[in-house]
Image (cartoon, rainbow, N blue to C red):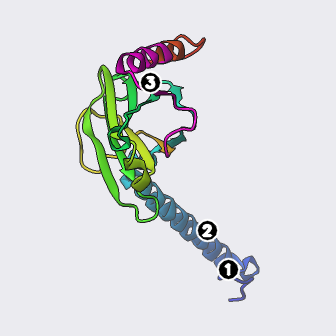
Amino acid sequence: MRGVGHGVPDLRDGPAGVVRHQQWRWEAWGRSLMILACLALAFRLAPPDAAAETPAEAHGVADAYVAPGIALAWGVLRDANEAATMVVLRIVTDPQRYPSLAVVGIDPFTRREQPLLQRKSSSGVIDLRVPRAHFADFPRTELRLYHAASAQPSDTPKLVLFYLGVPDTTPEFVNEAKLDAYLAERLARLRAKPGSKTP
């Protein structure tokens, strides 16, 4: 039997060559179907939420942030004793979009983490108070917003909002009542912005 390369039967071999060529075509078709079936099986066995395993990230820069499902504002409550000066982060979320959240401080060089807020229900307003001195050791702050109300196996945040240090524009107060009034007014303005889908 003559061949034309790559194992393809030569039709010039007469009727026998035609038969062998048809057999070769059916075998090649069968191999293609087998490959497609294996690919389809591999796709079906892949985790359905594989793409969701990598959370979206947003870099907060200013002392206030607003996005669909979340609004927050920063403030500083100053004290004569710097060790007692507190950074206050007021967070408001939509529990339908982000049923739970956690906040951690991170040392970006060692990746060591310091929990600032253990994962909890995100309904209502959360005031997070952190000593200003904390940011010298853990300058990165991550707000981890989850799609589920409670921790689940292989759970990952839906959104990670991170800051590097305390925003430069964060206002400082010596009176707690004035700080509280400022945060309330700042968030009200954020939520009133046209087109803002805030909680």
Q: Which of pointers 2 and 3 indicates the residue nearer the eye?
A: 3
Q: Residues within 10 Å of mark 1 (few under 14, many from 20)?
A: many
Q: Secondary structure at mark 2?
A: helix
Label 2 amino acid?
Arg
In space, the residues marked 3 and 1 are separated at their CA atoms by 65 Å
Residue on which the image places disc 2: 25
The span shown in magenta is 165-186
Q: Amino acid at mark 1?
A: Pro
Residue 16 belongs to magenta span:
no
Q: Residue furthest front?
A: 80
Q: Earlier in the sequence, mark 2 or mark 3?
A: 2
- Lower sequence index among marks 3 and 1: 1
Q: Quadrant of residue 125?
A: top left
Query: Quick one: SS at disc 3?
Result: loop
Label 1 secondary element: loop
Mark toward the start of the polypeptide (1 vs 2): 1
Q: Please name the residue shown 31% across and 28% down the image.
A: 99
- Report the disc number at residue 69: 3
Q: Left or right of 22: which side holds 71?
A: left
Residue mark closest to the camera, 3 vs 1: 3
> What is the three-letter code of the residue carrying label 3?
Gly
x and y, in percent, of residue 153 in the image:
24, 49
Residue of label 1: 9
Residue 97 visible? The answer is no
Q: Can residue 95 be seen at all in this image of the molecule?
A: yes
Which residue is drawn at the image coordinates 55% and 41% (left, top)?
59
Say above or below: 36 vs 61.
Answer: below
